[in-house]
């Protein structure tokens, strides 16, 4: 800001200095010419023409006038003041060009000539000179003074701009440092409303909103980490307890096999949670994108889940166009949909259905069940870690993990109202 202001001020000062000196030089030049015309007219009044001859009359102050006056009759000087050779030659040349101006070769003086006439016929001329030293001294002093004043003004402008900009930016620097410190050590601190200029008030509001989002994200991550730790600890404790129980004394083969199945089931539950987290981490890093056909994926999911649902008397219907592709890897899409089917298995009564719909640049996958449904006020709450739904069963991590993985891949999972008002509908919005 200071540099740009200084450059603009320097350009303006330079323009003013040049303009001022040009105006001054023009004014002084006119003054010199005006003085020369007056002096020439005064000198001409001291001459007269008698019988074709020029006569120079004596008058008061002749000594002062004669020092810079030449009188020519024809081409011959009848009055010649003392002076340098250059001024003499310039006067001789100018005598042949009446009503003209010229300067000596060294530019120390300016000369002007007027014609002397007799009955309309030029019989001679008067040449006068004016020393330019005083005028040149005035222009030099004016130039030096204007340059010095312009430089001083430029320094003052730069210093004032530096000080004003620094004072204006100081609160912003303080707010920036405070926001950075609070986000790292005290995420609950806020700027709030205060007596600030409008721009700083907007900045404070922006920082407060940013800190709110950071705090909410931090709380969500802490809560999710705590829930994950708890859920991982539970199957691990079951595995340890079952292994310890089996190791205490010899067990019948049937009891041993049942214990090993329980251990495998709990280990598979841990593996599923960890796989979901690893997939989400890779998706966050941009490692999981790709492309897959949705129809074969839903067929494979239906083939795996139909026996499990049929064991509980639940039918699974799948309807998907065969030519729909999604911009998500097959494994990632399956891990997004699996927790939704687990949720439907717990709440459905007799039917679960999967349907597909195109919506512009997205593909919508609807998963419906004929259970009790999700109240409108809980449609966001079911995606919070630890929320176990209306019947209280489940770990409360499936839907939050599914949404986290979906958002990491540019997709979205949400609970929406069922079209016919019965049961629950979970919708997955996948990139086409």
Image (cartoon, rainbow, N blue to C red):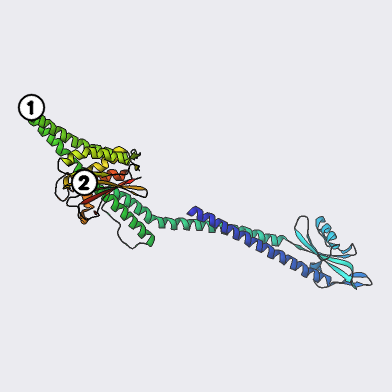
Q: Secondary structure at mark 2?
A: strand
In this orientation, which residue lies closer to the viewer: 25 or 301? 301
Q: Is residue 221 visible?
A: no
Q: Is residue 100 above or below residue 222?
A: below
Q: Is residue 137 visible?
A: yes
Q: Position of residue 386 (x, y in %)?
A: 18, 47
Q: Residue at x 41, y 58 (%)?
A: 168
In the rendered structure, the answer to whether residue 148 lies left or right of residue 423 reads right
Q: Give the numbered dot on residue 253.
A: 1
Local crowd at mark 2 within 10 Å, few (<14), some, or many (≥20)? Answer: many
Q: Quadrant of residue 343?
A: top left
**Marks 2 and 1, how far apart in space?**
38 Å
In the orientation shown, which residue stands out farthest toward the top? 250
Local crowd at mark 1 within 10 Å, few (<14), some, or many (≥20)? Answer: few
For the C terminus, give its image quadrant. Answer: top left
Q: Is residue 30 above or below residue 211?
A: below
Query: Mark 2 or mark 1: which is in front?
Result: 2
Q: Quadrant of residue 150?
A: bottom right
Q: Which residue is mark 2?
A: 352
Q: Quadrant of residue 263?
A: top left
């Amino acid at each position: 800001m200071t540099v740009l202001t200084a450059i603009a001020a320097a350009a303006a000062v330079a323009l003013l200095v040049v303009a001022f000196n040009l105006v001054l030089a023009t004014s002084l030049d006119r003054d010199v010419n005006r003085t020369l015309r007056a002096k020439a007219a005064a000198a001409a009044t001291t001459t007269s023409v008698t019988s074709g001859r020029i006569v120079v009359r004596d008058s008061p102050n002749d000594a002062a006038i004669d020092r810079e006056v030449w009188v020519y009759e024809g081409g011959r000087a009848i009055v010649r003041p003392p002076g340098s050779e250059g001024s003499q030659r310039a006067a001789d040349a100018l005598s042949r060009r009446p009503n003209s101006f010229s300067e000596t070769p060294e530019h120390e003086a300016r000369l002007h000539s007027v014609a002397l006439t007799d009955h309309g016929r030029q019989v001679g001329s008067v040449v006068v000179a004016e020393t330019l030293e005083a005028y040149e001294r005035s222009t030099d002093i004016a130039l030096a003074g204007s340059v010095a004043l312009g430089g001083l003004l430029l320094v003052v402008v730069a210093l004032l701009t530096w000080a004003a900009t620094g004072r204006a930016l100081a609160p912003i620097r303080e707010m920036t440092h405070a926001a950075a410190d609070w986000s790292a050590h005290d995420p609950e601190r806020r700027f709030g409303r205060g007596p600030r200029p409008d721009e700083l008030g907007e900045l404070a509001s922006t920082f407060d909103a940013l800190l709110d989002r950071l705090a909410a994200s931090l709380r969500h991550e802490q809560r999710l980490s705590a829930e994950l730790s708890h859920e991982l600890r539970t199957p691990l404790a079951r595995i340890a307890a079952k292994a310890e129980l089996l190791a205490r004394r010899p067990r019948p083969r049937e009891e041993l096999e049942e214990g090993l199945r329980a251990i495998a089931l709990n280990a598979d539950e841990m593996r599923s949670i960890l796989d979901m987290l690893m997939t989400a981490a890779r998706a966050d890093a941009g490692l999981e994108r790709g492309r897959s056909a949705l129809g074969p994926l839903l067929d494979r999911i239906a083939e795996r889940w139909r026996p499990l649902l049929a064991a509980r008397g639940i039918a699974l219907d799948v309807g998907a166009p065969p030519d729909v592709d999604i911009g998500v890897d097959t494994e990632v899409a399956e891990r997004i949909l699996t927790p939704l089917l687990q949720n439907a298995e717990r709440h459905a009564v007799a039917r679960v259905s999967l349907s597909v719909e195109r919506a512009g640049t997205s593909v919508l996958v609807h998963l419906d069940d004929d259970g009790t449904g999700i109240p409108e006020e809980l449609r966001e709450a079911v995606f919070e870690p630890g929320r176990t739904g209306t019947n209280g069963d489940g770990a409360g991590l499936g839907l939050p993990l599914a949404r986290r993985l979906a958002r990491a891949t540019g997709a979205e999972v949400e609970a929406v109202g069922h079209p016919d008002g019965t049961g629950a509908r979970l919708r997955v919005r996948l990139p086409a």
